């Protein structure tokens, strides 16, 4: 019975080491997984698409450019260059490539959600519906404002 317990202990220690190695390998990717999960499951792309069509894309592009500029100033790469796709790229163009990749992932998450591939994971309630299921505009009422009374 003793060799069985020793082998079981060795198996558990090996499984623990595999789990630790797997977590150490996945840990640097957690921010990217969080980015994808947020844009895929927490954003209502039906509403956001309407905002983007009406000119919101300009704000997204400007936020991306400012992000690349600030990131480039705050965290320059060691040696002054990034190694991207086999090329040595200077600081600001390298950060622009990274931010562009993040924005591309953002838009891909939107297209996946809009295609319906998320199913019930990305269902959002309509805020303008009243308790009987009709919107305020359909009933001829002004939308309710939620302001606190003045004292």
Image (cartoon, rainbow, N blue to C red):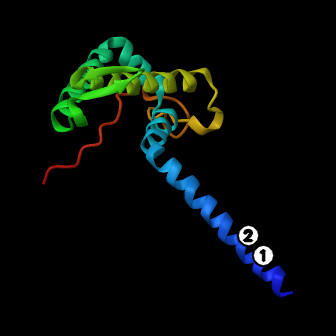
The secondary element bearing badge 1 is classed as: helix
Q: Is residue 136 left or right of residue 68?
A: right
Between residue 14 and residue 112, name the one nearer to us: 14
- The residue under the point 22% across, 23% down is 92
Label 2 crowd (10 A; few <14 / some 14-19 / many >=20): few
* Vertical placement of residue 78 versus 7, above or below: above
Query: Label for residue 7?
Result: 1
Q: Quadrant of the N terminus?
A: bottom right
Question: Is residue 8 visible to us here?
Answer: yes
Label 1 crowd (10 A; few <14 / some 14-19 / many >=20): few
Residue furthest to the right in view is 1
- The residue under the point 40% across, 24% down is 101
Q: Position of residue 114 (x, y in %)?
A: 56, 22
- Residue 93: which quarter of the image? top left
Q: Is residue 23 left or right of residue 77?
A: right
In 3D space, how far apart are the residues under numbered discs 2 and 1 (Cα atoms)?
A: 6 Å
- The residue under the point 62% across, 25% down is 116
Q: Position of residue 27 (x, y in %)?
A: 47, 50
Query: Label for residue 112?
Result: none
Q: Quadrant of the C terminus?
A: bottom left
Residue furthest to the bottom in view is 2
Q: Position of residue 106 (x, y in %)?
A: 43, 26
* Vertical placement of residue 26 versus 91, above or below: below
Q: Is residue 129 left or right of residue 13?
A: left
* Vertical placement of residue 84 versus 32, above or below: above
Between residue 125 and residue 39, name the one nearer to us: 39
Between residue 98 and residue 35, name the one nearer to us: 98
- The residue under the point 51% across, 33% down is 40
- Residue 145: which quarter of the image? top left
Pointer 2 and pointer 1: residues touching (CB < 8 Å)?
yes
Q: Which residue is mark 2?
A: 11
């Amino acid at each position: 019975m003793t060799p069985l317990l020793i082998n079981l202990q060795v198996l558990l220690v090996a499984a623990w080491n595999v789990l630790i190695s797997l977590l150490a390998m996945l840990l640097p990717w957690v921010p990217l997984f969080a980015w994808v999960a947020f844009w895929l499951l927490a954003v209502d792309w039906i509403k956001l698409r309407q905002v983007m069509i009406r000119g919101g894309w300009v704000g997204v592009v400007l936020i991306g450019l400012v992000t690349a500029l600030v990131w480039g100033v705050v965290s320059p790469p060691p040696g002054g260059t990034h190694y991207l796709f086999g090329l040595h790229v200077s600081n600001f163009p390298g950060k622009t490539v990274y931010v562009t990749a993040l924005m591309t992932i953002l838009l891909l998450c939107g297209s996946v959600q809009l295609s319906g591939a998320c199913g019930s994971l990305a269902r959002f309630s309509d805020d303008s519906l009243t308790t009987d299921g009709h919107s305020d505009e359909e009933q001829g009422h002004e939308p309710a404002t939620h302001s606190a009374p003045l004292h």
